[in-house]
Image: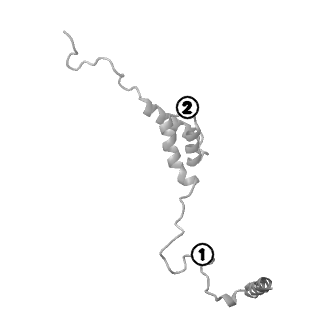
């Protein structure tokens, strides 16, 4: 007769044999335990840079390490009117006569007018 008897197991992985994910996890734990002076960030970066690691794992580790290396960009525009804008943008209004360049511009304009009429 074909097939297996009740309770009989044929083929497949033997009981207790670790799969790839378990082997990888155990290797990572062993590597971390071998040098207790390595920071978690350095450990993540070493996994990310290891060409023998699966690409998907390296991408996941890079995403985990990114916030520790590259801070998120801050929102520079805020709806808070209580001084959240930088001082360089808060400009006091001024008339054209108050501009320090006004007398010089007027002198250039008069000289140009004399040349045209001239």
Q: Nearer the viewer, residue 52 or 29?
A: 52
Dot 2 surroundings within 10 Å: few (below 14), some, or many (20 or more)?
few
Residue under label 1, please give it.
86
Q: Work out which residue is located at the far top of the displayed protein and give it.
A: 1
Please report the residue visible at 48 percent of the width from the left and 43 percent of the height from the top: 60
Residue 59: x %, y % from top left: 50, 42
How many marks on residues? 2
Relative image position of residue 54 (x, y in whole percent): 50, 34
Judging depth in this view, the residue of 36 and 48 nearest the camera is: 48
* Residue 42: numbered disc: none
On-image quarter of the N terminus: top left
**30 with respect to 103 (left or right):** left
Q: Is residue 10 above or below residue 60?
A: above
Quarter of the picture holding the C terminus: bottom right
Under circle 1, the secondary element is loop
For label 2, the residue is 52
| Cα gap from disc 1 to disc 2, whole angstroms | 48 Å
Residue at image x 56%, y 54%? 68
Residue 2 falls left or right of residue 104:
left
Q: Nearer the viewer, residue 58 or 89?
A: 89
Query: Residue 84 sits in which quadrant?
Result: bottom right
Q: Residue at x 40, y 25 (%)?
A: 17
In the image, taking residue 107 as reference, residue 76 lies left or right, namely left
Q: Residue at x 50, y 48 (%)?
A: 64
């Amino acid at each position: 007769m074909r097939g297996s008897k009740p309770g009989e197991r044929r083929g497949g992985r033997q009981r207790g044999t670790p799969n790839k994910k378990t082997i990888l996890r155990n290797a990572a734990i062993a590597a971390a335990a071998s040098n207790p002076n390595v920071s978690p960030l350095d450990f993540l970066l070493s996994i990310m840079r290891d060409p023998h690691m699966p690409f998907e794992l390296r991408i996941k580790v890079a995403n985990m390490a990114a916030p520790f290396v590259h801070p998120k960009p801050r929102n520079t525009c805020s709806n808070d009117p209580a001084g959240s804008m930088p001082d360089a943008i808060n400009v006091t209004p001024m008339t054209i006569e108050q501009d320090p360049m006004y007398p010089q511009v007027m002198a250039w304009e008069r000289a140009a007018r004399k040349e045209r009429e001239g």
